[in-house]
Image (spheres, rainbow, N blue to C red):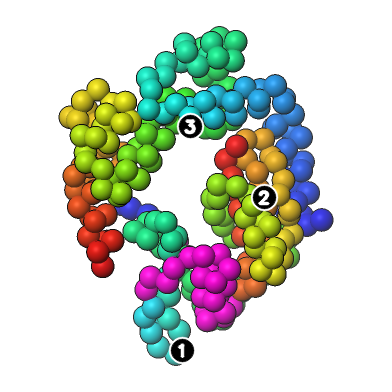
Amino acid sequence: MTYYHQEITRIEKICYSNKRHLETVIGIRHYINNNFDKELSLCLLSNIKFTSKFHLLRLFKRYYGQTPKQYHIDRRIQQAKLLLSKGTTVTETCYDLGFDSPSSFSTLFKSRVGITPTEFQKRATFTKSL
Amino acid sequence: MKVKVISIPVLDQEKALQFYTEKLGFVKKIDLPVGGGNRWLTVVSKDEQDGPEILLEPAPNHFEPAKVYQKALFDAGIPWTQFNVDDTQQEYERMLNLGVEFSVTPTEMGTVKVAVFNDNCGNNIQLVQML
C-alpha cells in the first residue's frame, strides 16, 4: 500500500465516519441531480430527509463545500451549457430548466459563465463547425 | 483571469500523447515544435474541447528539481492531478482492460469514489466520481 493510500484510508476514518450524515447529503445531492429543473427550497430538501433545514445546510456545506442552492445553480448552468451546445434555443433552455424568465436566466448565466447564453451558443456552434 | 492550461510533467512527450489519447480518450489540441525536440503539446477532454487544456510538458528532462519532485510524488503514490468521471468503477474496468496499472482500486471516501493509476510517464493520476 502506498503512502497516499494509507493517508486517504486514515483521513476517511477521521472525516467520514458518520455514515448517516453521508447518506443524508448524498441522497440530497442525488435528489437535486434528478430535479434540477424544479424550484427546490431548503425547506423541501430538509423534509425529504426528515431533518431541520439548518442542519441540512450545515451538513451539505461540510461534505460538499457549497450550499444546496449553490450546487443546484451549478447543475442548472451545467445542463444549460449542454442544451445550448445541442442547439436548443435560449428561451427553450430557460424554461426547460425551470427559470422564471429569459432575462433572469441570461443574467445568472453570464454571472457564472462570463458570457451570455446567446454568445455561448454562437461559440459552441462555431467550434463544432471547425 | 481564466484557467486555460494546466500542466503535467512527462518523461516522454510522444509516449504521453499516446497514453492520454488512446487510453484516457483525450483529444490532441495543440502540437507546436519549440526547439530541441520539445513540443508545446496539449490535449483536451473529448466532451469539452473548448475547456481547459492539459499541457504535457517535458520539464523533468530539462530541470533536475522537477524530476526529483515528480519522482518523490510518484514513489509516495501521490497523484499529480485528478480527472472527474461519472463512474469510477466503470472507468477502472475499462482502463484495466487496456493494461493500465492502478495503485488504488476504486475506493469510497466520504462523498467521492476515487482510484489512482500510473500514467506511464512518471505520474500517478486520480480518478474522482462525486457520489
Residue to which mark 2 is pinned: B89
Query: Disc 2 marks which amino acid?
Result: Gln
Query: Disc 1 marks which amino acid?
Result: Gly
Residue name at image x 37 percent, y 39 percent: A79
Do pointers 1 and 3 mark residues of a single chain?
no
Residue name at image x 47 percent, y 13 percent: A44
Q: In this view, does B116 lie above or below B61?
A: above
Is-magenta flag for residue B21?
yes
Which secondary structure lies at badge 3? helix
Residue name at image x 72 percent, y 45 percent: B107
Using the image, name the chain to which the residue with label 3 belongs.
A
Q: Is residue B36 above or below residue A62?
A: below
Nearer-the-camera pick, A88 or B104: A88
Q: In this view, does A6 lie to the left or right of B44?
A: right
> Magenta segment range?
B4-30
Instruction: Tell which tag, 1 or 3, sits nearer the viewer.
Output: 3
Do pointers 3 and 2 mark residues of a single chain?
no
Query: Disc 3 marks which amino acid?
Result: Asn
Residue to which mark 1 is pinned: B37
Residue B124 seen by the camera: no
Image coordinates of residue B115 in percent, x first then y, are 67, 52
